[in-house]
Image (cartoon, rainbow, N blue to C red):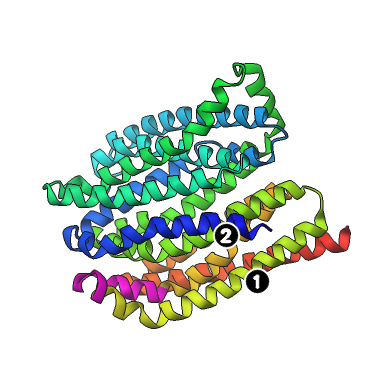
Amino acid sequence: MSYKKILVLFSSQTVAQIIPFLIAPLISRIYGPEMFGTLAILMALTELIGGVSTLRMEMAIPITTSYREALVVTKVCFTFTIIFCLIAFIVLSGLKFFDFLPAISNYIIFIAPFSALILGFGISLNYFNLKNEEYNRIAIANISRSTSQGSFQLFFGYVGGVQFGLILAYLFSGIIYDIRLIKKYLTDVRSSSRIDVDEMKRVIVLYKHFPLFSFWSALLNSMSRNSIIFFLNHLFLKSHVGYYSFALKYINAPLLIIGNSIANVFFEEISKENKNIKQIKILFIKNLKLLLLGSILIFVPVYIYSEMFFPWFFGERWMISGTVVKLMVPLLALRFISNPLSFILLSLRKHKLELILQNIFLIWNVLLWTSIFFFRLNFLESIELLSLGLGIYYFLNIIVLLRIILNLEINN
């Protein structure tokens, strides 16, 4: 694996988090838990819709056989995203009209599809730039998104736009990210002949396993991840959603920097290796060791110091968020290891197995939330049960992935 590529993405994303982290003590004193709770609901809906709006066709971009084909697949992704988000807008509007979503504000329902459109385009453009090895362009886009979001949050906070400041900053920073990444795509489109419908149909058929199998796996995974926000919003106060989302925002930032940097390069490298099972196994084991070491170095200090750090750095009212982080350590550590490694299923085209695992994950989530409701657990007790329960799932997922790799060596 190219550690230089990982370093480029890792260093850029690290820089991208410095300014937002430094201004976080100001942001946390301008906006309260309820406002972060509202933002979390919008982000959950955005990920639920936008994260799968391409029908997972973006995963085909790195494994395309030519740059022309990569352009065609990217256009297919854009088309799917537009259609999917339009359908989502109609469905959400209908659900709200018939009062099936009483706990979610009207304006969130109408903003979410537009926000999902921004996210869906960004996902496709990210993979297109990865295919073209435009790591510096991705790095600049990450820095621009992160710094602009923090800047907009401060601006709207100090000009009196506290009520919608977090949401507007989230939307504007997503648009800036897309603009940074789309330049390469537009340049290539202008220098190529027009992409026709027949070409788009051909790649849809060629990579049909992504929308047929991987899409459903991704949808189930997104539903499982974001169900925490929706269940918390239903069972507890919006401020509790804020405490949880605020905790995850600042602990996930460094985790996503490291995990996404490794995952992006890992998927690109194993896609290139294709049927070279021996090399894929080597790459997998290297990543596993790297992630294990990283989890130890990160999560031991987090467990020890999070309850002291949060009220000191962010303000006394965020003390509960520090406790949430401590309780979530088992889940965060195991998910940190599992998620990047799961790309091996896409590379090996084990879409049915991926779908089965996501079904198990969703069912396990429902069982955990049923237990929380049945035993009437309070907020922190619920977080602790979720952390331990979902941590078990991710541990077993790592074992399954490792067995797949070992069996591949035996069979080949």
Report the side of 374 relative to 36 (left or right). Answer: right
Residue under the image location 55 percent in, 69 percent down: 334
* 7 vs 270, nearest the viewer: 7
**Residue lying at 53% horizontally and 31% vertically, measured from the top left:** 185
Query: The residue tagged with tag 2: helix, strand or loop?
Result: helix
Instruction: Report which residue position mark 2 lands on.
Output: 339
Image quadrant occupied by the N terminus: bottom right
Q: Nearer the viewer, residue 371 or 260?
A: 260
- Tell me the tag on residue 289: 1
Q: Position of residue 102 (x, y in %)?
A: 26, 45
* Residue type of the residue flagged with mark 2: Asn
Please tell me how many numbered marks the rendered image carries: 2
The residue sitting at 43% across, 80% down in the picture is: 301
Q: Quadrant of the C terminus?
A: bottom right
Picture quadrant of residue 402: bottom right
Residue 296 in the figure: left or right of residue 162: right
